[in-house]
Image (spheres, rainbow, N blue to C red):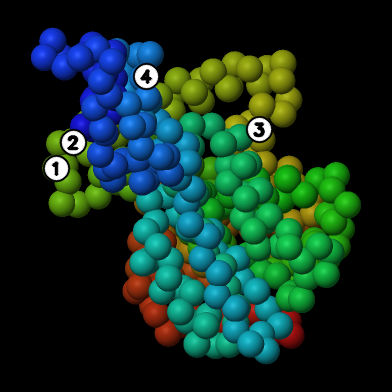
Amino acid sequence: MLLLQKACQQQHPSPTMPTNAVEPVPVDADQVLMNEAPTNGQRIEDDDPAGCQKSAKKARAQKWQPPIRESYIEGSKSLVILFGWAGCRDRYLRKYSEFYESSGISNVRFTAPISHIRHFADYRPLAQRVFDQVFGKEGDNWPHDVYFHVFSMNGCSTFCALWDALKGTHYEAAFKQRVQGIIFDSSPANVSPNQSARAISFAGFPPPTSSVVRESVKGLLLTYFSVQRARIWVQSMWDEGVYERNFAYYRMLAIDDLPQRQCYLYGPGDEICTHSSIEEFAESQREAGKQTTLHCFPDSAHCQHMRTHTEEYQRLCVSFINDDE
């Protein structure tokens, strides 16, 4: 970045310039993004341009926050919170918002960016930000019945983080009473290291990225996730809660107050979150006294059920919400 390089190099004035002269520094796009005033000759102690560039990129990354899109429909009694899958772009999640809007249902959509996630705990501040923006301004007087629509384990992880963030707050009981149900798309499932590596590598390097690059990244991720699983397995010998602190699937199994009404949209064509694992989770919820509705799409892939069965998918979602009104 030209600006930062110039700022760093001002410690060593040009021999042709008087030492007490200050060279004006122009404003560039990087400064605008960082919301900083031009330095106008202000000296920066680090004389390493590369280091300055790295610091600037880090500052921008820390300031950037993934968007929370809110759409409120006049007269709507329900609010659907959509949590997207890993690598989901807003233009994809917007399609779900649009069919809710066309049915007169308010909605909020948000996707936790996988680039911000290193551990399960990293979802917590993202989920807290969603809650504060959407519900914090209303105090304890929320005007809507609330539903969650979560996609894959990225969506489940975001939901878990939000649910856990409520614990011990003065509004926990009031909010949870407003939550009338949850729709699971392609989740929850006990995902293997290989499935996790495949999902994240594809999300980070989708076509037309070279398959060689994608497979290389997948191999590295597979090694990382396999080592992580092995470490957690060893730790579980003396630490009873280690699995639920590190994996959303086990955390959801441990939560005893998940929404009473649950809808599962899944299929055998899903190679990331297997239908057998989803059915096992749904069965555990049924045994716990929850009202579970399962719909198995025979031929659609992971998080592609609406794309393959558009009308049927939309009808199932809207009916699930309207049946409770």
Q: Secondary structure at mark 3?
A: helix
> Is residue 68 depicted above or below 124 in this figure?
below
Mark 3 and mark 1: span between their CA atoms?
35 Å
Measure the alpha-carbon separation of dots 4 and 3. Answer: 42 Å
Q: Percent from the top left, x then y, of residue 55?
A: 38, 25
Amino acid residing under circle 4: Ile
Q: CA distance from mark 1 to mark 2?
A: 5 Å
Where residue 44 is drawn, which disc sits there? 4
Q: Which residue is mark 3?
A: 245
On screen, 57 above or below 9? below
Identify which residue is drawn at 72% across, 29% down.
241
Q: Which residue position is annotated with label 1?
A: 210
- Is 36 in front, or is 184? 36
Judging by the rendered image, the residue that carries numbered circle 2 is 213
Mark toward the start of the polypeptide (1 vs 4): 4
Amino acid found under the numbered disc labelled 2? Val
Q: Secondary structure at mark 1?
A: loop
Between 140 and 321, which is closer to the camera in this rendering?
140
Q: Nearer the viewer, residue 289 or 56?
A: 56
